[in-house]
Image: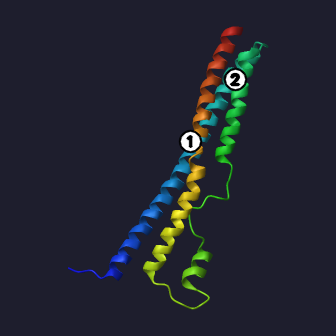
Amino acid sequence: MSTSSYEASGAGYALAYREARRGLEDQERSVVELRARAGTLFAAAAITTSFFGAQTLARHDIGVAGWVAIACFVLLGIAVLVMLWPRQDWAFSLGPAEFIATYLERADGEAVEPHLIERDLALHMGRSIKLNSAQLNTLPGIFRFGALLLLIEVLAWAVALAAVG
């Protein structure tokens, strides 16, 4: 069974397109998951601060450990804000208007073959994956920093309670 080079290149471009699309979907899913975890992290910090902080403040003596816990809470809030802040520079898709103008309603009136559209889209998505990677690689580090701050906050509140208790 022989396959022409046209069919082979078409199949190759289709495969490249599917893989690039899968890569962008994986990146988008990672961003959504990290943002959800960041929200959970902040909720845990808020509950910890409200519970332990209220007990510490009821004794009218915050102490150094209490201030450390409060500082960790504030820093964790900033870390979560950095993760959740809306960004305009994520690139997960090609806008429909751009797609139509580039491939379907070209100024020169030339029709673009479907396999060449897939090739172009795969290259476009590859650039988007590279652009997104720089931002996406920083988010897990920020999340880990926030988790560490939560741990320090809990320990600091425990020390603060033990000191006044």
Identify the residue at horizontal 73%, vertical 27% (top origin). Answer: 71
Which is closer to the viewer, label 2 or label 1? 1
Task: Please identify the quarter of the rendering in which residue 4 is found.
Answer: bottom left
Q: Is residue 63 left or right of residue 107?
A: right
Which quarter of the image is occupied by the C terminus? top right
What colour scheme governs how the chains and residues are painted in the rendered image of this protein?
Answer: rainbow
Residue type, mark 1 in image: Pro
Residue type, mark 2 in image: Ala
Which quarter of the image is occupied by the N terminus? bottom left
Q: CA distance from mark 2 to mark 1?
A: 22 Å
Q: Is residue 139 left or right of residue 22?
A: right
Q: Is residue 147 left or right of residue 61?
A: left
Where residue 5 sits: x, y (%)? 33, 81
Where residue 136 sits: x, y (%)? 57, 49
Disc 1 secondary structure class: helix
How many neighbours does mark 2 have within 10 angstroms: few (below 14), some (14-19), or many (20 or more)? many
Is 127 above or below relative to 41?
below
Disc 2 secondary structure class: helix
Q: Which residue is mark 2?
A: 69
Q: Which residue is mark 1?
A: 140
Where residue 97 sits: x, y (%)? 62, 76
Q: Is residue 7 left or right of residue 81?
A: left
Identify the residue at horizontal 37%, vertical 77% (top origin). Answer: 9
How many neighbours does mark 1 have within 10 angstroms: few (below 14), some (14-19), or many (20 or more)? some
Identify the residue at horizontal 53%, vertical 90% (top origin). Answer: 110
